[in-house]
Image: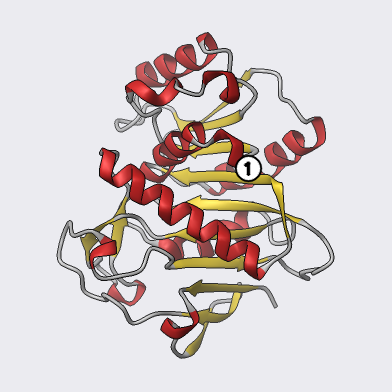
Amino acid sequence: MNRLSSSVMPENLTSTISDANVADDFLHDNLGQHNTSESRSSATEPANICSVFTPLHYEPNYAYPLVVWLHAEGENETQLRQVMPKISMRNYAAVAPRGTVSLGMPRLDQWGATYSWPLSNGDLSEASEHICMAMEHAEQRFRIDSNRIFLAGSGAGGTMALQIGMTLPERFAGIVSVGGPLPREDALMAHLNEIRQMPILLMVERDNEHYPNTMVCEDLRLLHIAGMTVTLRQYPAGGTLRDSMLSDIDPWIMDVLASGQKTPIVTA
């Protein structure tokens, strides 16, 4: 059976519980379960709290591509267990770090506190730390091909994926943003020569009030002017994180891995 676990350092791991059909071990921590609203997660919790996805029929002698998933605002690292079965059960190992700022408890508090990914300077440094530590955790647990690591996210997590991926282009083979606008940061193109070969997948809903068509066009224009390799896919309105969006991530990654370089394309 496939495994999905939320993991911290071994001394922080507690009991094992079963959940749904995609997970037979969910290792959870009992740190900072009820953070106050808008408090930093690192104030009470280590940066290495993350969820880990083990691909179906994991083969330890094969170097897997790694998907690093950044959850949407108002979610937490456990969003990975909803996402990866819709992307692929077999093709990737995956890890999801926790966001940098707590938003408090959700309606259903059995999933724990919710978090987001603000873009202030301090939060960017902390987000980078969370992401790098999650990658290190995955590399310790699995055999990972370090040249095939993809940074992906939804909403605020998608925006942070673009920010961190374009800041640390040497660490990632591609970036996927599901409904996350391009960050409006002056230093975003600081590594222009390196990021020009970075494949980017933008997945957007038509007429989304949080990412309107005018902003999508501005982002696409900026990325093309910078000479970057961009795939834009648009979907009908109604549901930010659609199954069809997630299922389209796998063939895009496989195309990137097969071709080594993508040709800029816009599909509707």
Color scheme of the displayed model: secondary structure
- Horizontal and vertical percent for residue 109? 28, 74
Of residues 19 and 151, the one drawn nearer to the viewer in this rendering? 151
In the figure, residue 46 lies in which quadrant? bottom left
In the figure, residue 119 lies in which quadrant? top left
Side (left or right) of 218 relative to 64: left
The residue at 26%/75% (across/down) is 32
> Is residue 180 depicted above or below 37 in this figure?
above
SS at badge 1: helix
> Is residue 111 depicted above or below 90 in this figure?
below
Total marks placed: 1
> Is residue 211 depicted above or below 128 in this figure?
above
Can you say which quadrant of the picture contains the C terminus?
top right
Q: Can residue 148 be seen in this view?
A: yes
Can you say which quadrant of the picture contains the N terminus?
bottom right
Q: Residue lying furthest bottom in this view?
A: 15
Of residues 126 and 118, the one drawn nearer to the viewer in this rendering? 126
Q: Residue lying furthest top in this view?
A: 225
Side (left or right) of 91 relative to 13: right
Residue that label 1 marks: 249
Of residues 165 and 263, the one drawn nearer to the viewer in this rendering? 165
Side (left or right) of 244 relative to 17: right
- Horizontal and vertical percent for residue 73? 32, 50
Q: Residue lying furthest right in this view?
A: 61
Residue type for callout 1: Ile
The residue at 60%/40% (across/down) is 172
Of residues 63 and 230, the one drawn nearer to the viewer in this rendering? 63
Side (left or right) of 185 relative to 44: right
The residue at 43%/62% (across/down) is 77
